């Protein structure tokens, strides 16, 4: 589209300059016969200024100026077609319509280049044609004599409009094709990067994890179980099955709890109210992912920082809200002096906020920690959160 706009701008500059040169040459050749008659000098000066402004703007900005400026230019052309024979009937009778015809024909071409809706083009051609015909009648000519010239004006405007329309459509198709090609190239590059990453994960990371479990390199049973769980997940992921539960929030939470248990943490999971809730099936994948991520972080914090190996997880969905809470009776901490590395702000609170929910952390030194995450369920007037 940018290329077409530049072409239209160049064409407009050429037409405006050509029309100005033509009009100026006729004035010089004919001894400036209209310059001293009535308001004609003012109209000619205004037409010259608008043509100059159009040429400068189109040349500098590489696109057509505002339609208002173009409309003013064509309106001045129509005004001159009527004003010349009205204020200089004697001169116009001798030279009309030969003098005005070339400029009006060029103006018709400009109209076809300037406007895209064909009714606008037809309206401006009708205005210019009517003004030209009225000027001919005021100059003493018969009204039907300009008809061949009107047909030429309509043909000029129609051809220029059609050619410009074809160029605009072709440019849009070309831009669309280029955008699709860029997208295909990006997708191909992404697929290649995924394939390369998959090879690296399979040949290095997965083989190492499985060897650690298979060959007895890990003596600690809970750690070995966790490594085995992660290696199974990684192999499934490389096969294209990452175990994503989609919109099943219960399956997602159970997966997180199972991974925590595999890592040596004893988790008491109470989800009876969530399992029986009729709202469970309406929870969006985005909310499921946020809740599962927050639960994973909370259980990781228990395993790393609470100083205990037991946690209670409770989940329910009712009254338009899904709630997941994690309770431990560990060491706790001072919430005003949160120790680094807990990931509470980013992995729990921010996750809940990203889906329109909230998260609270109740704790004190020696009193354990209670993390509660709440997220709104989608309703008719509140659709599911999108990525």
Image (cartoon, helix red, strand yellow):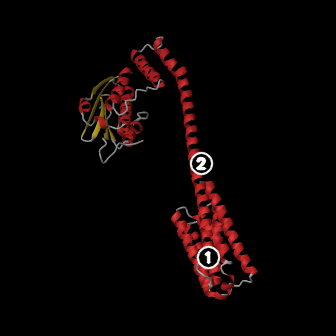
**Circle 1 sits in a helix, a strand or a loop, which is it?**
loop
Q: Is residue 274 above or below residue 125?
A: above
Which disc is residue 174 wearing? 2
Task: Check disc 1 and report the residue beneath it.
Answer: 146
Tag nearer the camera, 1 or 2? 1
Marks 1 and 2, Cα distance to the nearest angstrom? 42 Å
Picture quadrant of residue 324:
top left
Whether residue 82 is visible here, answered yes or no, is no
In terms of sequence position, does the residue under pointer 1 or pointer 2 come before the other? 1
Q: Is residue 174 above or below residue 38?
A: above
**Circle 2 sits in a helix, a strand or a loop, which is it?**
helix
Residue 252, percent from left and from top? 35, 29
Q: Residue at the spot x=60%, y=74% of the render?
A: 147
Quadrant showing the C terminus: top left
For the residue carrying disc 2, how many other residues have a C-alpha within 10 Å: few (<14), some (14-19), or many (20+)?
Answer: few
51 or 11: which is nearer to us?
11
Whether residue 383 is visible here, answered yes or no, is yes
Q: Is residue 378 above or below residue 277?
A: below
Q: Residue at the spot x=66%, y=62% of the render?
A: 11
167 or 323: which is nearer to us?
167
Picture quadrant of residue 96:
bottom right
Q: Residue furthest top?
A: 215
Residue 321, percent from left and from top? 28, 40
Residue 243 placement, left or right of 54: left
Residue 381, percent from left and from top? 30, 48
């Amino acid at each position: 589209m940018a290329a077409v706009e530049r072409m239209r701008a160049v064409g407009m500059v050429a037409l405006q300059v050509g029309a100005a040169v033509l009009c100026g040459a006729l004035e010089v050749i004919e001894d400036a016969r209209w310059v001293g008659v009535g308001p004609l000098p003012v109209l000619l000066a205004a037409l010259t200024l608008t043509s100059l402004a159009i040429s400068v703007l189109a040349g500098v900005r590489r696109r057509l100026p505002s339609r208002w400026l173009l409309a003013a230019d064509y309106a001045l052309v129509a005004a001159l077609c009527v004003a010349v024979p009205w204020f200089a009937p004697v001169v116009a009778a001798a030279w009309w319509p030969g003098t005005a015809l070339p400029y009006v024909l060029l103006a018709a071409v400009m109209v076809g280049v300037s406007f895209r809706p064909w009714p606008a083009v037809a309206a401006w051609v009708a205005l210019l044609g009517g003004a030209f015909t009225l000027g001919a009648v005021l100059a003493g000519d018969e009204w039907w004599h300009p008809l061949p010239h009107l047909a030429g004006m309509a043909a000029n405007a129609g051809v220029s409009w059609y050619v410009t329309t074809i160029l605009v459509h072709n440019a849009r198709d070309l831009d669309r094709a280029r955008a699709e090609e860029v997208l295909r190239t990006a997708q191909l590059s992404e697929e290649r990067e995924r394939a390369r990453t998959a090879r690296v994960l399979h040949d290095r990371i997965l083989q190492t994890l499985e060897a650690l479990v298979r060959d007895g390199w890990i003596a600690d049973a809970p750690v070995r179980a966790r490594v085995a769980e992660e290696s199974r997940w990684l192999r499934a992921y490389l096969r294209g099955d990452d175990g994503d539960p989609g919109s099943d929030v219960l399956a997602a939470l159970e997966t997180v709890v199972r991974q925590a248990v595999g890592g040596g943490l004893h988790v008491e999971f109470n989800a009876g109210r969530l399992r029986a809730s009729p709202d469970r099936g309406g929870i969006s994948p985005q909310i499921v992912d946020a809740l599962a991520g927050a639960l994973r972080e909370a259980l990781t914090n228990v395993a790393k920082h609470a100083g205990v190996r037991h946690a209670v997880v409770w989940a329910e969905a009712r009254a338009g809200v899904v709630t997941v809470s994690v309770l431990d009776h560990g060491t706790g901490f001072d919430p005003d002096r949160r120790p680094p590395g807990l990931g509470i702000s980013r992995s729990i609170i921010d996750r809940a906020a990203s889906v329109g929910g909230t998260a609270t952390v109740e704790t004190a030194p020696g009193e354990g920690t209670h993390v509660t995450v709440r997220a709104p369920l989608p309703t008719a007037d509140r659709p599911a959160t999108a990525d």
